[in-house]
Image (cartoon, rainbow, N blue to C red):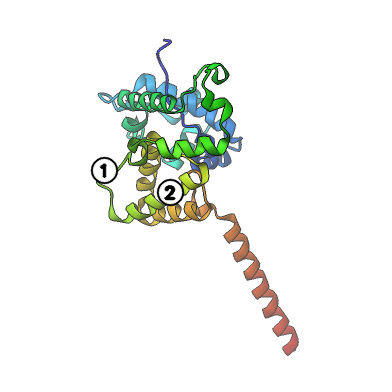
């Protein structure tokens, strides 16, 4: 039906889970996103708050997504649960339910109202703000006119104490890098992912994302630079040890 749709975040292709699935399946991140859309459309049509689990198999889900091994990769990154022949989606209510779609539509509506830009053709809007003002001026206005809903989308949640400070600093980092506040729906999804990773991992990933000035949550386990430095140090230590042994002969 024409009214059927799912919400997909702009930064989906850069998520650590998508990159991990691409490595597992040996395909590009673009292909993973395409398979995810096909899979989530099936989920949207078959699951609901009244029926959060359905019977299924990994083989059947692979056919739905159009890629062998896709369901197993979803389980590996925590985006799919299969237990006793029942399929479930973690955080289904947050991302695919009717209330999640309503929040996404309302957020989009408010965003368009603030920017005063037509979603069809911005050039035909006819406002002077979009044509005559430079990027810095528009960025300044965005920083002044953003709503409290964006800035404090999760303030009413009962958050664990360990996440409050790094989460606040992470949001400030995103704002400093992009010039705008992280949308409320993206805040909810990112925060749920941080909490899912647990205190040690979640806090480490937030601090790592702040350090890297990232626009989205990163995985601190993928700090290839630190691995490279560690490898170089070990090699240097080994060379020094071999030199000492040679001198003592």
| Number of other residues with Cα within 10 Å of mark 1, as a class: few under 14, some 14 to 19, many 20 or more | few
Foreground pick, 124 / 164: 124
Q: Nearer the viewer, residue 64 or 138?
A: 138
Residue depicted at 55% across the width and 55% down the height = 223
Q: Give the vertical position of 141 relative to 162 (above or below).
A: above
Q: Is residue 85 visible?
A: no
Residue 228 found in image quarter: bottom right
In the rendered image, which residue does mark 1 sit on? 157
Which mark is drawn over residue 63? none
Q: Using residue 160 as the reference point, say whether residue 111 is left or right of it.
A: right
The image quadrant where one finds the N terminus is top left
Q: Residue 18's spot in the image, x, y percent?
A: 52, 38
- Residues 14 and 129: in front is 129
Disc with the residue nearer the chain's start (1 vs 2): 1
| Mark 1, secondary structure of its residue | loop
Q: Residue at x 37, y 37 (%)?
A: 150
CA gap, disc 1 and disc 2? 19 Å
For the residue labelled by badge 2, is the local secondary structure a helix, a strand or a loop? helix
Mark 2 sits on what residue? 172
The residue nearer to you, when weighing 128 against 165, is: 128
Question: Residue extending furthest top?
Answer: 1
Which residue is found at the position 24% from the left and 46% from the top? 158
Task: Give how far across and how far down residue 75 sits, in percent.
Answer: 43, 38
């Amino acid at each position: 039906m024409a009214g059927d749709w799912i919400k997909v975040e702009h930064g989906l292709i850069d998520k650590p889970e998508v990159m991990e699935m691409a490595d597992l399946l040996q395909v590009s991140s673009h292909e993973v996103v395409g398979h995810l859309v096909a899979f989530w459309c099936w989920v949207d049509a078959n699951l609901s708050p009244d029926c959060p689990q359905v019977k299924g198999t990994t083989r059947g889900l692979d056919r739905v997504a159009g890629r062998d091994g896709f369901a197993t990769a979803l389980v590996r990154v925590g985006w799919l649960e299969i237990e006793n022949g029942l399929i479930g989606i973690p955080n289904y209510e947050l991302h695919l339910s009717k209330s999640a779609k309503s929040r996404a539509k309302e957020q989009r509506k408010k965003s368009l109202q603030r920017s005063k830009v037509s979603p069809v053709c911005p050039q035909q809007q006819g406002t002077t703000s979009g044509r005559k003002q430079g990027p810095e001026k528009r960025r300044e206005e965005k920083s002044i006119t953003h709503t409290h809903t964006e800035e404090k989308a999760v303030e009413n949640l009962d958050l664990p104490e360990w996440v409050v400070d790094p989460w606040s600093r992470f949001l400030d980092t995103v704002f400093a890098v992009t010039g705008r506040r992280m949308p409320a729906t993206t805040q909810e999804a990112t925060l749920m992912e941080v909490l899912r990773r647990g205190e040690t991992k979640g806090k480490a990933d937030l601090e790592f994302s702040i350090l890297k000035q990232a626009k989205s949550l990163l995985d601190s386990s993928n700090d290839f630079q630190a691995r490279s430095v560690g490898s170089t140090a070990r090699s240097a230590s080994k060379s020094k040890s071999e030199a000492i042994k040679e001198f003592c002969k």
